[in-house]
Image: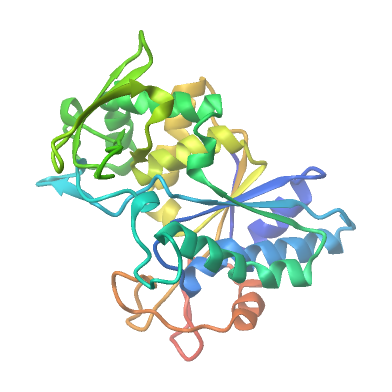
Amino acid sequence: MTRHFFASGLHELAASLPEDAVVHAGARPYGLHAGNRLPIVVYPILLAEELRRLGHAGGYRHLVTLNDWDTDGLVHAPGYPVNFIPRGRSFQHQVDPAGCCASLVDHWERQLGMELRPLTDRHPEVAVEIRRVSSYRAVPAFADTLRFGLTHPDELGRRAASAFGVPVDCPRAQLAGAVCPGCHSIDGMTSYDPMGDRVSFGCRQCGAATEDVFTRFDYWLYTHLVGAAKCRAADPDAWIFGGDFVEHRAIDFLERTVELLQGRPPRMMSLFTPVLLGSDGEKMSKSRRNLLDVPLDWLVSRAASWDAPRLAPPGGSPGY
């Protein structure tokens, strides 16, 4: 997997893309801010401009996956940042706090559509698709990744320990699980029988014990295991990541997991954007409450020539 970085990397990638390429970016239905716009909207606009300059009139397909089988309800076991205790619900089954849509995912899917309009307005040759992760449940490569997560969490734990350089209690690792069909909690015990392809889930919230075939359950997956499953299922030609994916070595976990599951590294090229800084000079993040409203046109203009890992917002200190 070839890695490309920032503006110069975008030019390298554009020169290598095949006709009718699939270019992917992922999103959590949790909140969008100016930093998220870099991989989802800004770099796709710049890529379309570069392809047009190179004479690729056909554009490309921009696939944005929405991680509805991800969750913000995992609790870290003390001393083990990749050993998770499931709590709460997957994004798929969370209510919309704004109250305007049937679910949290419906809300952010609509928001994503609005965020992507500048791309399609400026470059109608680019075909944009928003796809929920749950829609890949019947794709064999995705389902097999999930099955592996249920049966061999210790193997994935070892990959996580190697990639992130953190201690992992591999025998007790849990990176995927079922969702209670009744109350939609992820707080429970998941068991998988590969002989019958059946799943059992004991819910700690409502007390229900459910057994059914693998395909009848909804699931939650650790964020970066979702990434590996999407990589195998969508098989994009290129994936645009935020710069924190390489800084925190999440990309190493994705690559090693995909190679473990399919016997070879992912074929896709990767492109990394700078990390956009917030009001406190740190990475812009909803959890840090350092969000700033940065105009899209400023981001496009600035990112077009920016070749450093950090990008400060207008009026901020220069990036580095």
How many numbered marks appear?
A: 0
Q: Locate residue 85, reporting x and y percent.
A: 17, 42
Residue most toward the top?
195
Residue under the point 62% across and 78% down: 302
Residue under the point 22% across and 51% down: 88
Q: Locate residue 155, reporting x and y percent.
A: 30, 24
> Is residue 146 positioned above or below 44 on the image?
above
What is the quadrant of residue 8 in the picture?
bottom right
Model colouring? rainbow
> Is residue 110 positioned above or below 138 on the image?
below
Q: Nearer the viewer, residue 26 or 8?
A: 26
Residue under the point 47% across and 35% down: 229
Q: Is residue 242 left or right of residue 170?
A: right
Q: Locate residue 205, reporting x and y percent.
A: 14, 43
Q: Nearer the viewer, residue 316 or 82?
A: 82
Quadrant (top left/top right/bottom left/bottom right) for the N terminus: top right
Q: Nearer the viewer, residue 174 or 259?
A: 174
Q: Residue 220: tell me if it is visible.
A: yes
Q: Residue 155: tell me if it is visible.
A: no
Q: Locate residue 238, reporting x and y percent.
A: 64, 46
Q: Is residue 299 left or right of residue 183?
A: right
Residue most toward the left?
78
Residue under the point 48% across and 41% down: 134
